Image (cartoon, grey):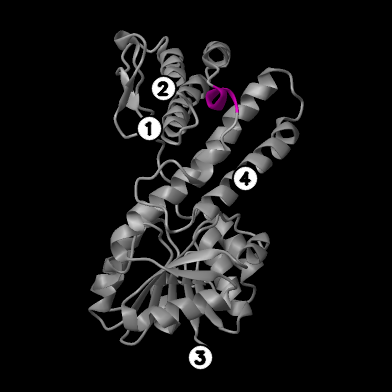
Amino acid sequence: MTRLGIGVVGAGRVGAVLGSALRAAGHPVVGVSAVSQESLERADALLPGVPVLPVPEVVRRAELVLLAVPDDALADLVAGLAATGAWQAGQIVVHTAGRYGTAVLDPARAAGVIPVALHPAMTFTGTSLDLSRLVGCTFAVTAPTPVLPIGQALVVEMGGEPVVLDEAVRPLYHAALAHGANHLVALVAQAGQALADAGVADPGAVLRPLLSAALDGALRAESAAGEGRAAGDRSTGAVTTLTGPVRRGDAGTVRDHLDVLTGLGVRTGATDVAASYRALSRAATGRALAAGLLRADQGEALLDALAAGEPDAPAHAPGPDGSTVHGAHDDEGDGDGGSAPGADQEDQA
């Protein structure tokens, strides 16, 4: 496509890397904004020689403005620039916020800009290592139909794979990515802490082959399930690769796990580990039942074990047909696991 003067607003982990990738594709970067010392160093490392400028000046110089700021800051930034008349007719404005489509750019559209939302489904370190990871990375592209080819071409130039996404589903799409990537990190941190408390010198070395194999198998199965999977179908995909005590219906093992993880919380204050184990085991039980991997009596025994010591929990769990499975004792039912906050755009794109 035509070479465009790129202005990068936000030299965070995402902006500096994407700016560097577009520069490598032949687009000159005419300016970058950076405030913190970390951003200044990142801009110097990934965009050497590019002038660091105030945001309005970056916008004034650019034919394509790349807005790579935290999600919660995006709307105010766009509106503020519109209020000062900074946007220019015909200018391409691209943002990288996962939760938004192009509606957040409406104040700029009123000035005649071309709106595009690009979101790479990748965690960024903000270093040159990310540039190779962009190759083959999926980018969600949302834009008015006549403009979609621009967004798709930009993604291809950076080595990515464009996938068109409707405006309405962007929040669900982003929630799915944050749930998978961010909570995977929390899970590894919890497992690592438990191993360290057990005396394992290098928890990462112990977890790496196990988690790598589990993740690879789950992702392969999820891909094999394909786009033809019916909405709400929990019987195919990653759940078919489930292993461990829940898959075997070993309620006694699950009960013992909760006992020792609760003890870990008492000793160290890490009460979140047992809580997460309980919530995720409950989710695994529900999905294993739905997939026909467990008998109903095995599911009941597991749910009773998971409800032990949790007096406020309800007594029902999702069954294989979307109904409920009752524990052996209704006053020892299972509860719903809570969810952690989503990701900061600069850390998890």
Q: Position of residue 90 (x, y in %)?
A: 34, 87
How far apart, in angstroms, are the residues tagged by discs 1 and 4?
23 Å
Quarter of the figure with residue 57: bottom left
Q: CA distance from mark 4 to mark 3?
A: 42 Å
Q: Is residue 86 found left or right of 199 in the rendered image?
A: left
| 96 or 87, nearer to the observer | 96
| Residue underneath mark 2 | 296
Number of other residues with Cα within 10 Å of mark 1, as a class: few under 14, some 14 to 19, many 20 or more: many
5 is higher (above) or lower (below) than 133: below
Is 206 rendered above or below residue 104?
Answer: above
Q: Which mark is residue 2?
A: 3
Q: Secondary structure at mark 2?
A: helix
Viewer-nearest of labels 3 and 2?
A: 2
**CA separation in Å, label 2 and label 4:** 26 Å
Please report contact status of discs 2 and 1: CB closer than 8 Å, yes or no: yes
Question: Magenta region: which residues?
Answer: 244-248
Foreground: disc 1 or disc 3: 1
In contact (CB < 8 Å): disc 1 and disc 3: no
Determine contact: label 2, label 4, CB under 8 Å. Answer: no
- Sooner in the amino-acid sequence: mark 2 or mark 4: 4
Instruction: Write down the quadrant of residue 93 in the picture.
Output: bottom left
Q: Amino acid at mark 1?
A: Pro
**For marks 1 and 4 on the same chain, the one whose residue lies earlier in the sequence:** 4
Please tell me which residue is depicted at 57% across the width and 14% down the height of the picture. 253
Left or right side of 41 for 293: left
Frontmost of labels 1 and 4 is: 1
Pointer 2 or 1: first along the chain: 2
User: Where's residue 187, x and y in %?
Assistant: 55, 33
Reading the image, the residue beneath label 4 is 217
Circle 1 SS class: loop
